[in-house]
Amino acid sequence: MAAAEGSTPQAEVMTIASPINLIIASLFVVLLYWHFRPKAPVELPRGPPPVVFRTYTPKTLIKFNGEDNQPVYLAVRGRVFDVTPGRGFYGPGGVYENFAGRDASRGLACQSFDEEMLTKDLSAPLDELKDLDAEQLENLQSWEERFSEKYLVIGKLVAEGDPEAPAS
Ligand code: HEM
């Protein structure tokens, strides 16, 4: 105490500015900066893209056949299902690729994925399936139920020229 009392103002400044104090002060400044530094905005994980319910015609639906990594859609009795999770079945090279981008109703009812089950003329009225027998209708019903449990309905299929058809 006696030495401090007798010290000059210059000596006091030297004591305050001693290396240890300077280090502590610098650490304090660094800590302050670290605490209040500008932080990058928090990025929330991205969810799946929103599902938009649309109206399709056979001509607009056909684009969704899974080529070029695009989604895969198919229609059953006027309901369009997003079967992209089943790309292995319906995507290019899949066993049921004929159904991709198409009205699959007749094929499902008749348990056949042959080309002739599909409506050739995309501008024609939709297949009304009027000739199906009870067993085929039952098949179709059970496929529809399975699809409803597994896939999202993302639209409606109408014929080309229908008042509800999207402008092409
Ligand atoms: C040789 C006869 C056939 C065999 C061995 C066979 C086998 C299979 C198998 C193993 C699956 C996967 C089941 C699953 O994991 O959920 C499947 C799914 C499917 N089969 Fe066949 N199948 C045959 C004929 C057909 C026919 C004629 C059709 C025509 C309608 C058809 C339509 C389908 C469809 C649409 C799915 C996929 C359903 C989904 O998206 O989950 N199959 N088949």
Image (cartoon, grey):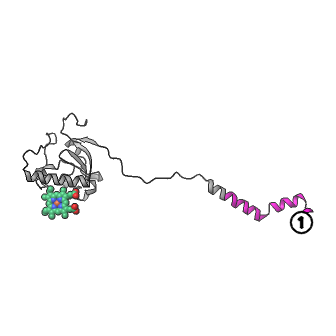
Examine the rendered structure and indicate whether residue 125 appears above or below residue 112. Answer: above
Residue 52 in percent (x, y) is at 31, 44
Of residue 14 and residue 74, the one placed in the foreground of this image is: 74
Q: Quadrant of residue 155?
A: top left
Q: Nearer the viewer, residue 120 or 77?
A: 77
- Picture residue at 28% right of the left edge, 52% below the top: 68
Residue 44 vertical position relative to residue 158 in the rendered view, above or below: below
In this image, 28 relative to 150: left or right?
right
Q: Quadrant of the C terminus?
A: top left
* Chief secondary structure of the magenta portion: helix
The reply, left or right, for residue 150 in relation to residue 103 is right
Disc 1 residue type? Met
Q: Quadrant of ligand 1?
A: bottom left
Q: Residue furthest top?
A: 163
Query: Residue 129: percent from the left, percent from the top?
Result: 10, 45
Q: Is residue 62 magenta?
A: no
**Can see residue 1?**
yes
- Is disc 1 placed on a helix, strand or loop? loop
**Crowdedness near tag 1: few (<14), some (14–19) or many (≥20) residues, C-alpha within 10 Å:** few
Residue with the mark numbered 1: 1
Q: Which residues are magenta?
A: 1-30
Q: Residue 70 appears at what percent x and percent y? A: 29, 51
